[in-house]
Image (spheres, helix red, strand yellow):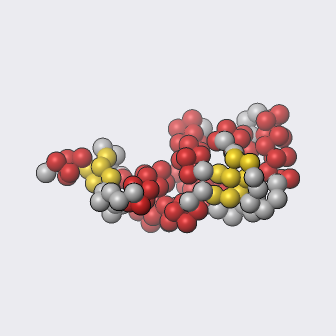
Amino acid sequence: MLGVDTNVLVRFFVGDDEEQFAQAKGLIGAADQGALFVSPVVMVELNWVLRRVYGYSRDAVMVVLQGMTEFRQFQLGKREMIVEALSLSSATGADFSDALIALLDQEAGCTATVTFDRKAPRLSQMMAVSEALA
């Protein structure tokens, strides 16, 4: 099994560098089932890069991330949690990364995750810093 860095996935999904796109496509296309490991950190980075660097809409990024769960070649670290974070994000409008962070924190025993983000508290696992101070 090989771990896949975010930049390989960005090249594959964005295709902005022909040579690297061809290499990423070749790697993913030739991989056996579950031969490529994608960590939760890579999923968070992919979300951020596609949204902030490439200007993808939230919906477009959600399609990419959801698609990642269906690639036979990918073994997703914390797969069930990623699927749950995608579901929470879709249901609440919160960012996928915030949903995954909240779930990871909850798994670690946190009662909530505090944030300055205005949309993140849509998740029951998140709360505003001001609420935590009250």
Above or below: residue 103 compared with residue 14: below
User: In the image, 25: left or right of 4?
Assistant: right
Residue at left 36%, top 53%? 120
Residue at left 51%, top 63%? 81
Location of residue 17 in the rendering, given as x and y in whole percent from the top left corner: 76, 33
Location of residue 113 in the rendering, given as x and y in whole percent from the top left corner: 33, 52
Above or below: residue 6 compared with residue 1: above
Location of residue 58 in the rendering, given as x and y in whole percent from the top left corner: 52, 51
Residue at left 60%, top 56%? 77
Q: Name the residue nearer the viewer: 116 or 75.
A: 75
User: In the image, 126: left or right of 27?
Assistant: left
Location of residue 24 in the rendering, given as x and y in whole percent from the top left corner: 78, 43
Residue at left 55%, top 66%? 80
Is residue 112 among the parts visible in the rendering? yes
Name the quadrant containing residue 126. Answer: bottom left
User: In the image, 49: left or right of 94?
Assistant: right
